[in-house]
Amino acid sequence: MKWFIVLHLFGVIFWLGGLLIVSSILATAAQEEAGAQTALLKLARRLFNSACNAGAAITIVFGLLILMSEPEVMRHGWMHVKLALVGVLIILHVWMLRRSGHIGSGPGAPSRGEFLAIHGIVSIVLLAILMMVIIQPF
């Protein structure tokens, strides 16, 4: 069980660290010229495919293994909130991936502000998850 928790936390760090780094890179790419945009987008895609996707998979797999090992934790309201927040992270993950493909595409292209907003929301969701897990308010 302890190994599941260690690997779950490793995945969380990889996933959310990746999302925060990639959102910063995409925010910069959104305001750059075409040549710089291409290089930044290539870097962002590499990080997204390695850190973000792998981290998300590790987090989800080991999170599910923890839940299967201790199903009684689902009786607590804080766990339901935590899982809903994980759902928000998955939505942000997919949103950022889809929107990154539209950088530099003219009208409707994502702006620096959009990726900075995603960065901020990921940070707030991470803080809320930590509060749920550590404080277990209900």
Image (cartoon, rainbow, N blue to C red):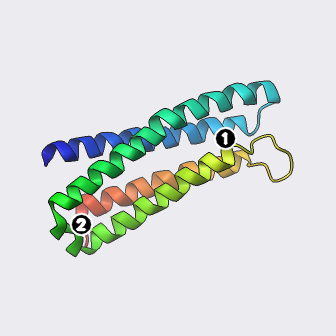
Residue 6 quadrant: top left
Badge 2 marks a residue whose secondary structure is: loop
Q: Counting other residues with Cα less than 10 Å from the Cα at mark 1, is it few (<14), some (14-19), or many (20 or more)?
A: many
**In-image side of 43 versus 32 (left or right):** left
Q: Is residue 11 visible?
A: yes
Q: Position of residue 138 (x, y in %)?
A: 25, 74
Residue type, label 2: Gln
Mark 1 — residue? 27
**In-image side of 125 versus 29 (left or right):** left
Residue 43 quadrant: top right
Q: Position of residue 47 (x, y in %)?
A: 53, 32
Q: Position of residue 48 (x, y in %)?
A: 53, 37
Q: Is residue 17 visible?
A: no
User: Residue at coordinates 60% horizontally, 46% vertically from top-left?
Assistant: 97
Residue type, label 1: Ala
Q: In the displayed structure, would residue 120 be above or below residue 17? A: below
User: Residue at coordinates 51% horizontally, 42% vertically from top-left?
Assistant: 20
Q: How far apart are labels 2 and 1 at the CA level?
A: 34 Å
* Residue closest to the far right: 107
